[in-house]
Amino acid sequence: MTGSQAVADGAPPPSGGVSDCETDVICVEAHDPGAPGSTPAQGGSRTTVGGKEVCRWYGQEVPCSLDDAGWFNAADGCYYRRASPQPAAGDPAWMGHDPSDGGAVYNVLCYPPGSNTVTGAPPRWLAEPPAGDPPPTPAQVAMDAISRIQLGKPVLHTAPGKDGKPLVGMGLWLWYDPAEAISVDGKAGENTAAADAPGIRVTATATLQYVDWYMDDSPDPVRCTGPGTPYQAKYGGAESPDCGYRYTTSSADRPGSEFTVSAILHWRIEATVEGTGTHPIDPLEPTADSQLLQLPVGELQVLN
Protein backbone atom coordinates (compact mmCIF):
# COMPACT_ATOMS: atom_id res chain seq x y z
CA MET A 1 0.00 0.00 0.00
CA THR A 2 1.42 3.40 -0.89
CA GLY A 3 1.16 6.47 1.28
CA SER A 4 -1.51 9.11 1.01
CA GLN A 5 -1.08 12.23 -1.10
CA ALA A 6 -2.59 15.67 -0.86
CA VAL A 7 -3.36 17.01 -4.31
CA ALA A 8 -4.73 20.50 -4.74
CA ASP A 9 -7.29 21.27 -7.44
CA GLY A 10 -5.56 22.53 -10.54
CA ALA A 11 -2.17 21.00 -9.71
CA PRO A 12 -0.55 19.48 -12.80
CA PRO A 13 -0.33 15.68 -12.87
CA PRO A 14 3.06 13.97 -12.85
CA SER A 15 4.68 12.85 -16.08
CA GLY A 16 2.66 10.30 -18.00
CA GLY A 17 -0.62 12.15 -17.41
CA VAL A 18 -1.75 9.98 -14.46
CA SER A 19 -2.16 11.71 -11.09
CA ASP A 20 -0.98 10.24 -7.80
CA CYS A 21 -4.60 9.96 -6.73
CA GLU A 22 -5.27 7.51 -9.56
CA THR A 23 -2.38 5.25 -8.54
CA ASP A 24 -2.57 5.37 -4.72
CA VAL A 25 -4.83 3.10 -2.71
CA ILE A 26 -5.45 5.90 -0.19
CA CYS A 27 -5.84 9.36 -1.62
CA VAL A 28 -6.81 12.68 -0.08
CA GLU A 29 -7.90 15.43 -2.43
CA ALA A 30 -7.69 19.01 -1.24
CA HIS A 31 -10.39 21.14 -2.88
CA ASP A 32 -10.21 24.92 -3.02
CA PRO A 33 -13.64 26.18 -1.90
CA GLY A 34 -13.06 29.45 -3.74
CA ALA A 35 -13.13 32.97 -2.49
CA PRO A 36 -16.23 34.30 -0.73
CA GLY A 37 -18.82 35.36 -3.23
CA SER A 38 -17.24 33.42 -6.12
CA THR A 39 -19.50 31.69 -8.68
CA PRO A 40 -19.46 27.85 -8.65
CA ALA A 41 -18.54 25.92 -11.77
CA GLN A 42 -21.24 26.29 -14.39
CA GLY A 43 -23.02 23.45 -16.17
CA GLY A 44 -22.22 19.77 -15.90
CA SER A 45 -19.37 17.37 -16.42
CA ARG A 46 -18.88 13.64 -16.71
CA THR A 47 -15.32 12.46 -16.12
CA THR A 48 -13.46 9.31 -15.14
CA VAL A 49 -11.37 9.40 -11.95
CA GLY A 50 -9.51 6.27 -10.86
CA GLY A 51 -11.53 4.14 -13.24
CA LYS A 52 -14.81 5.46 -11.83
CA GLU A 53 -17.21 7.80 -13.59
CA VAL A 54 -17.85 11.04 -11.70
CA CYS A 55 -20.70 13.36 -12.69
CA ARG A 56 -21.11 16.96 -11.53
CA TRP A 57 -23.78 19.57 -12.01
CA TYR A 58 -22.99 23.17 -11.12
CA GLY A 59 -20.06 22.06 -8.98
CA GLN A 60 -22.00 19.38 -7.05
CA GLU A 61 -21.40 15.68 -7.54
CA VAL A 62 -24.53 13.87 -8.73
CA PRO A 63 -25.23 10.21 -9.54
CA CYS A 64 -24.20 9.21 -13.05
CA SER A 65 -27.28 7.01 -13.26
CA LEU A 66 -30.55 6.54 -11.39
CA ASP A 67 -32.41 3.25 -11.38
CA ASP A 68 -35.74 4.82 -12.29
CA ALA A 69 -34.49 7.73 -14.38
CA GLY A 70 -31.64 6.51 -16.58
CA TRP A 71 -28.26 8.04 -17.39
CA PHE A 72 -26.97 11.54 -16.68
CA ASN A 73 -26.24 13.78 -19.66
CA ALA A 74 -23.76 16.49 -18.62
CA ALA A 75 -24.69 18.66 -21.59
CA ASP A 76 -28.07 19.63 -20.14
CA GLY A 77 -28.19 18.17 -16.61
CA CYS A 78 -30.89 15.65 -17.48
CA TYR A 79 -31.35 11.93 -16.98
CA TYR A 80 -32.64 10.04 -20.01
CA ARG A 81 -34.28 6.64 -20.07
CA ARG A 82 -35.57 5.23 -23.32
CA ALA A 83 -39.35 4.81 -23.04
CA SER A 84 -40.28 1.14 -23.24
CA PRO A 85 -42.59 0.49 -24.88
CA GLN A 86 -42.32 3.47 -27.18
CA PRO A 87 -45.45 5.67 -27.49
CA ALA A 88 -47.89 4.88 -30.26
CA ALA A 89 -47.46 6.64 -33.59
CA GLY A 90 -48.98 10.11 -33.49
CA ASP A 91 -48.31 10.63 -29.78
CA PRO A 92 -47.12 14.22 -29.09
CA ALA A 93 -43.94 12.79 -27.54
CA TRP A 94 -42.73 11.97 -31.08
CA MET A 95 -42.60 15.73 -31.73
CA GLY A 96 -43.95 15.33 -35.25
CA HIS A 97 -41.75 12.36 -36.14
CA ASP A 98 -42.90 8.88 -37.09
CA PRO A 99 -41.51 5.71 -35.44
CA SER A 100 -40.26 4.63 -38.86
CA ASP A 101 -38.10 7.77 -39.05
CA GLY A 102 -35.64 6.33 -36.53
CA GLY A 103 -34.63 7.78 -33.21
CA ALA A 104 -36.59 7.14 -30.02
CA VAL A 105 -38.65 8.81 -27.32
CA TYR A 106 -37.00 9.22 -23.92
CA ASN A 107 -38.44 9.88 -20.48
CA VAL A 108 -36.62 12.83 -18.92
CA LEU A 109 -35.73 14.13 -15.44
CA CYS A 110 -33.60 17.27 -15.16
CA TYR A 111 -31.66 19.32 -12.61
CA PRO A 112 -32.62 23.00 -12.75
CA PRO A 113 -29.51 25.26 -12.91
CA GLY A 114 -27.82 25.36 -9.51
CA SER A 115 -30.12 22.69 -7.99
CA ASN A 116 -29.27 19.13 -6.95
CA THR A 117 -32.92 17.98 -7.04
CA VAL A 118 -34.28 16.49 -10.24
CA THR A 119 -37.67 17.50 -11.57
CA GLY A 120 -39.85 15.95 -14.25
CA ALA A 121 -39.74 17.10 -17.86
CA PRO A 122 -41.86 16.17 -20.90
CA PRO A 123 -40.74 13.12 -22.90
CA ARG A 124 -38.44 13.96 -25.81
CA TRP A 125 -37.73 12.47 -29.19
CA LEU A 126 -34.00 12.20 -29.95
CA ALA A 127 -32.48 11.13 -33.25
CA GLU A 128 -29.50 9.62 -31.40
CA PRO A 129 -29.12 8.29 -27.84
CA PRO A 130 -27.90 10.99 -25.42
CA ALA A 131 -24.33 10.86 -24.15
CA GLY A 132 -23.81 8.12 -21.58
CA ASP A 133 -27.05 6.35 -22.39
CA PRO A 134 -26.56 2.61 -22.94
CA PRO A 135 -27.96 1.13 -26.15
CA PRO A 136 -31.41 -0.47 -25.89
CA THR A 137 -31.64 -4.17 -25.20
CA PRO A 138 -33.34 -6.52 -27.68
CA ALA A 139 -36.19 -6.90 -25.18
CA GLN A 140 -36.74 -3.12 -25.12
CA VAL A 141 -36.79 -2.95 -28.91
CA ALA A 142 -39.21 -5.89 -28.93
CA MET A 143 -41.57 -3.97 -26.64
CA ASP A 144 -41.37 -1.06 -29.09
CA ALA A 145 -42.49 -3.33 -31.91
CA ILE A 146 -45.22 -4.95 -29.82
CA SER A 147 -46.57 -1.57 -28.70
CA ARG A 148 -47.33 -0.72 -32.35
CA ILE A 149 -49.86 -3.58 -32.47
CA GLN A 150 -53.30 -2.51 -31.22
CA LEU A 151 -55.93 -5.09 -30.30
CA GLY A 152 -59.41 -3.81 -31.02
CA LYS A 153 -62.95 -4.57 -29.85
CA PRO A 154 -64.84 -5.97 -32.84
CA VAL A 155 -68.60 -5.79 -33.29
CA LEU A 156 -70.25 -9.20 -32.85
CA HIS A 157 -72.70 -10.59 -35.38
CA THR A 158 -75.20 -13.46 -35.30
CA ALA A 159 -77.58 -14.91 -37.88
CA PRO A 160 -79.99 -16.16 -39.04
CA GLY A 161 -83.15 -15.18 -37.18
CA LYS A 162 -86.78 -14.39 -37.67
CA ASP A 163 -87.12 -10.58 -37.94
CA GLY A 164 -83.63 -10.39 -36.51
CA LYS A 165 -84.56 -12.55 -33.56
CA PRO A 166 -83.09 -16.07 -33.37
CA LEU A 167 -85.26 -18.90 -32.15
CA VAL A 168 -84.64 -21.64 -29.60
CA GLY A 169 -83.03 -24.63 -31.33
CA MET A 170 -82.05 -22.64 -34.43
CA GLY A 171 -78.48 -23.02 -35.65
CA LEU A 172 -76.83 -19.65 -34.98
CA TRP A 173 -73.77 -18.37 -36.86
CA LEU A 174 -71.27 -16.31 -34.84
CA TRP A 175 -68.67 -14.01 -36.38
CA TYR A 176 -66.94 -10.64 -36.38
CA ASP A 177 -64.90 -8.65 -38.91
CA PRO A 178 -61.19 -9.55 -38.50
CA ALA A 179 -60.15 -6.05 -39.61
CA GLU A 180 -61.84 -4.62 -36.52
CA ALA A 181 -59.87 -6.87 -34.18
CA ILE A 182 -56.30 -5.78 -34.84
CA SER A 183 -54.30 -2.96 -36.40
CA VAL A 184 -50.73 -1.67 -36.64
CA ASP A 185 -50.22 2.09 -36.44
CA GLY A 186 -53.91 2.51 -37.26
CA LYS A 187 -53.85 0.23 -40.34
CA ALA A 188 -56.81 -2.12 -39.87
CA GLY A 189 -56.21 -5.84 -40.23
CA GLU A 190 -52.39 -5.58 -40.02
CA ASN A 191 -50.80 -7.94 -37.49
CA THR A 192 -47.02 -7.47 -37.93
CA ALA A 193 -44.87 -4.58 -36.73
CA ALA A 194 -41.13 -3.88 -36.65
CA ALA A 195 -38.83 -1.68 -34.57
CA ASP A 196 -35.18 -0.80 -35.05
CA ALA A 197 -32.18 0.26 -32.96
CA PRO A 198 -28.48 0.36 -33.89
CA GLY A 199 -27.57 -3.19 -34.91
CA ILE A 200 -30.99 -4.56 -33.91
CA ARG A 201 -34.24 -5.14 -35.78
CA VAL A 202 -37.20 -6.81 -34.12
CA THR A 203 -40.32 -8.08 -35.88
CA ALA A 204 -43.43 -8.80 -33.80
CA THR A 205 -46.40 -10.78 -35.13
CA ALA A 206 -49.76 -11.28 -33.41
CA THR A 207 -51.67 -14.49 -34.15
CA LEU A 208 -55.21 -15.23 -32.99
CA GLN A 209 -55.23 -18.43 -30.94
CA TYR A 210 -58.95 -18.82 -30.24
CA VAL A 211 -62.11 -16.89 -29.36
CA ASP A 212 -64.37 -17.65 -26.39
CA TRP A 213 -67.98 -16.61 -26.97
CA TYR A 214 -70.14 -16.19 -23.86
CA MET A 215 -73.79 -16.67 -24.80
CA ASP A 216 -75.27 -15.83 -21.35
CA ASP A 217 -77.35 -19.00 -20.94
CA SER A 218 -74.38 -21.12 -19.82
CA PRO A 219 -71.19 -20.46 -17.82
CA ASP A 220 -69.15 -22.35 -20.40
CA PRO A 221 -68.02 -20.46 -23.48
CA VAL A 222 -68.27 -21.52 -27.08
CA ARG A 223 -64.66 -21.79 -28.25
CA CYS A 224 -63.89 -21.01 -31.90
CA THR A 225 -60.49 -21.04 -33.57
CA GLY A 226 -61.10 -17.98 -35.73
CA PRO A 227 -63.37 -14.97 -36.27
CA GLY A 228 -66.15 -17.11 -37.74
CA THR A 229 -67.76 -17.13 -41.17
CA PRO A 230 -70.21 -14.32 -42.07
CA TYR A 231 -73.71 -15.66 -42.73
CA GLN A 232 -75.34 -15.18 -46.15
CA ALA A 233 -78.95 -15.79 -47.07
CA LYS A 234 -77.91 -18.47 -49.57
CA TYR A 235 -76.80 -20.68 -46.65
CA GLY A 236 -80.42 -21.07 -45.50
CA GLY A 237 -80.62 -23.27 -42.42
CA ALA A 238 -77.13 -24.76 -42.77
CA GLU A 239 -74.82 -24.94 -39.78
CA SER A 240 -71.87 -22.58 -39.49
CA PRO A 241 -68.72 -24.37 -40.67
CA ASP A 242 -66.52 -23.00 -37.89
CA CYS A 243 -68.38 -21.08 -35.17
CA GLY A 244 -72.00 -21.77 -34.23
CA TYR A 245 -74.41 -22.20 -31.33
CA ARG A 246 -77.97 -23.27 -30.43
CA TYR A 247 -79.96 -21.73 -27.59
CA THR A 248 -82.05 -24.20 -25.62
CA THR A 249 -84.14 -21.61 -23.78
CA SER A 250 -85.67 -18.26 -24.67
CA SER A 251 -84.56 -14.96 -23.18
CA ALA A 252 -88.07 -14.06 -22.03
CA ASP A 253 -87.18 -14.18 -18.32
CA ARG A 254 -83.93 -12.15 -18.71
CA PRO A 255 -83.60 -8.39 -18.11
CA GLY A 256 -84.92 -6.69 -21.21
CA SER A 257 -85.87 -10.14 -22.53
CA GLU A 258 -82.37 -10.41 -24.03
CA PHE A 259 -79.24 -12.46 -23.65
CA THR A 260 -75.97 -10.51 -23.42
CA VAL A 261 -73.41 -11.97 -25.82
CA SER A 262 -69.72 -11.20 -25.45
CA ALA A 263 -66.43 -12.63 -26.65
CA ILE A 264 -62.81 -12.68 -25.52
CA LEU A 265 -60.12 -12.91 -28.20
CA HIS A 266 -56.93 -14.72 -27.17
CA TRP A 267 -53.78 -13.68 -29.02
CA ARG A 268 -50.17 -14.81 -29.11
CA ILE A 269 -47.53 -12.21 -29.96
CA GLU A 270 -44.10 -13.47 -30.96
CA ALA A 271 -41.09 -11.23 -31.45
CA THR A 272 -37.96 -12.19 -33.35
CA VAL A 273 -34.64 -10.35 -33.07
CA GLU A 274 -32.57 -10.05 -36.24
CA GLY A 275 -28.97 -8.93 -36.48
CA THR A 276 -26.28 -10.94 -34.73
CA GLY A 277 -28.15 -14.18 -35.24
CA THR A 278 -31.93 -14.43 -35.33
CA HIS A 279 -33.58 -15.61 -32.11
CA PRO A 280 -37.10 -15.38 -30.66
CA ILE A 281 -38.15 -13.51 -27.53
CA ASP A 282 -40.57 -15.13 -25.09
CA PRO A 283 -44.07 -14.61 -26.52
CA LEU A 284 -46.87 -12.66 -24.90
CA GLU A 285 -50.41 -14.01 -24.69
CA PRO A 286 -52.74 -11.01 -24.34
CA THR A 287 -56.52 -10.99 -24.57
CA ALA A 288 -58.96 -8.44 -25.97
CA ASP A 289 -62.67 -7.99 -25.39
CA SER A 290 -65.40 -7.55 -27.97
CA GLN A 291 -68.33 -5.18 -27.97
CA LEU A 292 -71.40 -6.52 -26.21
CA LEU A 293 -74.36 -7.79 -28.20
CA GLN A 294 -77.89 -7.79 -26.76
CA LEU A 295 -79.70 -10.73 -28.35
CA PRO A 296 -83.42 -11.54 -27.87
CA VAL A 297 -84.07 -15.26 -28.36
CA GLY A 298 -87.66 -16.30 -28.90
CA GLU A 299 -89.59 -19.56 -29.11
CA LEU A 300 -91.47 -20.74 -32.15
CA GLN A 301 -95.17 -20.71 -31.45
CA VAL A 302 -97.10 -23.59 -33.01
CA LEU A 303 -100.82 -23.10 -33.47
CA ASN A 304 -103.11 -26.13 -33.53
Image: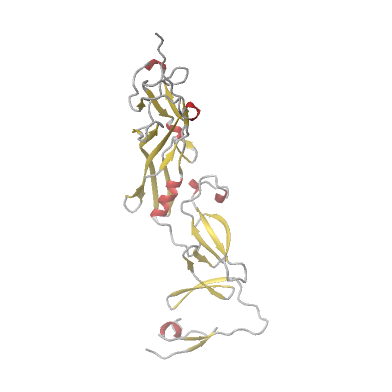
For the residue pair 53 and 241, the one nearer the viewer reads as 241
In which quadrant of the rendered image does the N terminus lie?
Answer: bottom left
Residue 126 x, y percent position in the rendering: 53, 55
For the residue pair 176 and 134, the one nearer the viewer reads as 176
In the image, residue 219 above or below residue 107: above
In the image, residue 258 above or below residue 145: above
Residue 35 x, y percent position in the rendering: 65, 85
Residue 29 x, y percent position in the rendering: 50, 85
For the residue pair 99 and 239, the one nearer the viewer reads as 239
Classify residue 230 by image quadrant.
Answer: top left
Question: Which residue is outermost to the bottom?
Answer: 3
In the image, residue 222 above or below residue 10: above
Residue at left offset 57%, top offset 50% = 95
Give the colour scheme shown: secondary structure
Classify residue 57 by image quadrant.
Answer: bottom right
Relative horizontal placement of residue 50, taking residue 40 as reference (left or right): left
In the image, residue 169 above or below residue 30: above
Residue 281 x, y percent position in the rendering: 34, 50
Res 132 seen here: yes
Residue at left offset 48%, top offset 67% = 65
